[in-house]
Amino acid sequence: MNKIRFSALKELSSHLPVKNTKAYYPSDVFGCDVLTLDKMQRYLSGEAFKQLQQIMSEGGTIDRNLADQVAAAMKTWALEKGVTHYTHWFHPLNGSTAEKHDSFIDVQTNGRIAETFDGRMLVQQEPDASSFPNGGIRNTFEARGYTAWDPGSPAFINNNTLCIPTVFVAYTGEALDYKTPLLKALSLIDKAAVDICQYFDKDVQKVIATLGWEQEYFLVDEALYNARPDLKLCGRTLMGHSAAKDQQLEDHYFGAIPERVNTFMDELEYVCHRLGIPVKTRHNEVAPNQFELAPIFEEANLAVDHNQLLMSTIKRVARHHHFRVLLHEKPYKGINGSGKHNNWSLLTDTGVNLLSPGKNPKSNMQFLVFLVCTAKAVLEHEALFKACIVSLGNERRLGGDEAPPVIMSVFLGQQLDSILNEIEEKVSSRKMSPDEKTELKLNVGKIPEIMRDNTDRNRTSPFAFTGNRFEFRAVGSSANCGAAMIVLNTAVAEQLMIFKRETDALIEQGVKKDEAIFQTLRGYIIACKKIRFEGNGYSPEWREEAKQRGLSVSNSCIEALRAYLSPKARKLFTENGIFTDRELEARYEIKNEIYLKKLQIESRVLGDLALNHIIPTAIQYQNTLIANVRGLKEILPDVYAEVGEMQLKAIKEISERTREIRTLVEEMTEARKRANNQIPNEVERAAAYSATVLSYLDRIRYHIDKLELLVDDEIWPLPKYRELLFCK
Ligand code: ADP
Ligand code: MG
C-alpha cells in the first residue's frame, strides 16, 4: 500500500467528533465580541454618541476630537475583554481579508509603557500597498496605501485582536479594495431609490440594500487533504476518477448531518454568534460532504464584511475538528460545485421591503417599478453582471452539474410574468379610459394574493425573483460578495434614475403621475423581454435561444472580464462616481492577473503530480504485470495462452497512457513557457494561458483518471474520490 495514502486513511479513524461547545442561549452570546453602537454609548459622552450615530446613518466626516473619543471607547472595551492588539481589517483585491496586528503598548514620554490607542490610529493606518494586488496603480516610488475606518461596520474581536473594518486606498486616492466602491454604490442606490419612493410615500428618507448570502462549501478530512497536493495548493482536485456512487441517489441533500460535521457546525455557529454574524440555517447540500450555511440578511455592507469574516472563521474552526474547508467553486469533477447565492433587496427606513408586493395598488405599483428596474438593469448590463462573478474556479462551475448557466437572464415567475404582460397590453401612450385604469389597478392590487401561492422556484436561473427578493445565484463560493454587490446596486440605481427622469418628463407634459409611471413601466417591460426567461436554463435550447436574443453565451472568464472596460461600463461607473477609469483598468488587470497565476499554479501542480506521482506508480504496476506475464509464459504456458493477451493489453494501455501524459505535460509546459517568454503584458498573457494552457488540464487528467481505474489500488498514491467524499 502506498505510504502517504495509507497513513492518511489510518489517521482518519482517529478523527472522532469532539464535543466542545457548552450549552448556551444564542441570544446571550450574540454579538458579545462586537462593539455595537449600543455598547459604544456606555463609553462615550452624550454629545459624542449623538454625533457618531448621525455619521453612521447619514455619513459625514469624523473630526479628530470625535475620533479620539471613539478610539478611547474602543480601547477601554477591548482591554476590559483582555484584548492586547488592534488591527485595521480590510478586503484587498486578492479576495481575502488582510490584517496587521499592532499591540496597544507604547512608550510614554516618561519612559513608561502604557496602552495607547488614539483617534489617529483609529482613523488611518499605512500598510504597504505594493504587496497587495494594485493593477499598476502603485507607483514604484510611492508604495504607500491607506486604510481608513468605516464607521458603518462595527469593530469586533477576533483572535484576541480588536479588528476595525476599514477601506483600503492607494496614496493617490484610488481604491484598492472592495469596500470603497461598495460604499459608494450603496449610497448611490439609497439616493436613487428614495427619489422613486417619493412618488409613493413622502415619509421615506433612506433606503438600504439588504444582502443575505448562502455559503456553500465542502469539508474534507484533514489527513486526506494533506495527502492531496492539488487540494492543498489549488483548492481543487486536478485528478480523480468519479466514485462509483456520488450524488446520483440524491441521498445527501437535507440528509441527517453526520455527527463530526454537526459538532463542527455547533462550534462554528457559536463563534459566529459571538461575532454578531446571524447565521441561521445549516444543511447538507447535494454533493456528498457538501454543506450550506446561511445567515439572516443584513445591510449589504455589513453582510459583505460578515461573509468575509465567515470565510476566514470557517477555515479556522474546521481545523479544530480535523477538517479542511474547500471554498473552491468546483473542487470535484462530475458533481455539484459550490456557489454563494446573493439574496438582495431594498428596505426603506419606514420598514418596507421594496421587492415585496404591498397591501394596496399604490404600494404594488412601487413594487413593480423596483422589480422591473432591476430586470432592466440586468438587461442593460448583462455583460457586467457576468464579469463580476467569473473566475477561474467559477468558470468550471457555471453551466455544469446543477449550476446556473453563464448566460444572464432574469426569472420572475409565471404570475408576475402575466401581470407584466397585462400592463404591456393595457397601457399605451394614448390616454387610458377610467374603466381601463380601474381594472388595471385592481389587478395590480391582487399581486400579493397571487404571490402567496407562488411556489415557482426556478433553480436554473442565474438571477431569480423569489417572492420578496432577487437571488443572484451565479456568484461563486469563494468570491467576495462585494464584486457582485457593486455591479448590482450601481446598475439598478442607474435604472431607477433613468426611470425617474423619463417619468418626470411625462408628468411635465401634463400626464397624470400614475399614468406616467405606468407608461414608463410599460416601455421597460417591453425592453426586458429580451432578458426575461422562465424556462429551463440548463437546456441546450436555451443556449440557442439566448444566442438569437443577442445575449452573451460564452463560458470564458477572460472574455467576460472585458466587459469591465466596455464604454457602457466605463460610463456607468465613472458618471456615477463609483470607479475612475484608472480604477476600472486596475481592477480588470488584477482579475486577469489572478486568473493567470491560479492557472499557472494548477498547471505546474498537475505537471509535477503527473510526472512524479502518477507515471512512476503506473510503471511500477506495469512492471508487476510484465513479471507476471513472463512468469506465466515460463511456468504456466497453458494459462498464458488463455490470459496472456489480456495482460499484454493492460501493459500496453499503461504504456500508451503514460506516453500520452508525458507528451501532454511537455506540450503544456511549452505552452506556458511560450506565453511567459513572449508576452510581457499580464492581461494578454492571461488570455494566452486561457487559450493555450487551460485545455491541457482536462486532457491530462483524462488519462490519469483512466490509469486510476487500471492500477492496483494498493499502490495508488492519492486518496480517491470515494475516500475524499465519503469519510466524515
Ligand atoms: P433558499 O435556499 O430557499 O434560497 P435559504 O433560507 O437557504 O433559502 O436562504 C434564503 C436567504 O435569503 C437567507 O440568507 C435570507 O437571509 C435571505 N433573505 C431573505 N429575505 C431577504 C431580503 N429581504 N433581502 C435580502 N436577503 C433576504
Ligand atoms: Mg437560495
Image: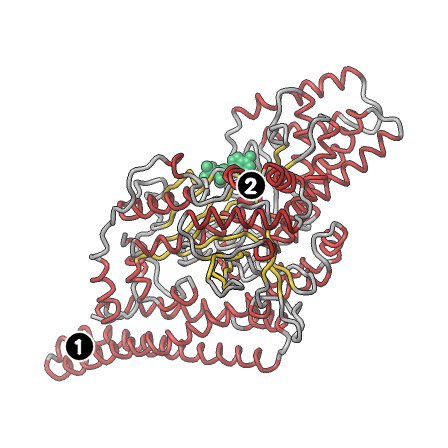
Q: Residue at x 68, y 49 (%)?
A: 381
Q: Amino acid at mark 1?
A: Ala
With 125 as the anchor, is 242 left or right in this view? left
Q: Which mark is residue 44?
A: 2
| Above or below, comparing residue 510 to residue 136 in the picture | above
* Labels 2, 1: front one: 2
Secondary structure at badge 2 equals loop
Q: Residue at x 67, y 43 (%)?
A: 59
Q: In this view, which residue lies farthest toward the top?
A: 435
Q: Which mark is residue 641?
A: 1
Real-space CA distance between mark 2 and mark 1, rounded to the nearest whole angstrom: 93 Å
Place residue 612 in its image quadrant: bottom left
Task: Judge the density around disc 1: few (<14), some (14-19), many (≥20) Cα neighbours within 10 Å.
Answer: few
Secondary structure at badge 1 equals helix
Q: Residue at x 65, y 27 (%)?
A: 419
Instruction: Give the percent coordinates (x, y) of residue 458.
Output: 52, 38
Q: Name which of mark 2 and mark 1 comes first in the sequence.
A: 2
Q: Is residue 111 visible?
A: yes
Q: Amino acid at mark 2?
A: Leu
Task: Judge the density around disc 2: few (<14), some (14-19), many (≥20) Cα neighbours within 10 Å.
Answer: some
Instruction: Give the percent coordinates (x, y) of residue 537.
Output: 54, 45
Q: What's the image's color scheme?
A: secondary structure
Quarter of the image with the N terminus is bottom left
Instruction: Give the percent coordinates (x, y) of residue 157.
Output: 45, 50
| Above or below, comparing residue 255 to residue 179 in the picture | above
Q: In this view, which residue lies farthest toward the front?
A: 110
Q: Is residue 539 visible?
A: no
With 111 as the anchor, is 507 left or right in this view? right
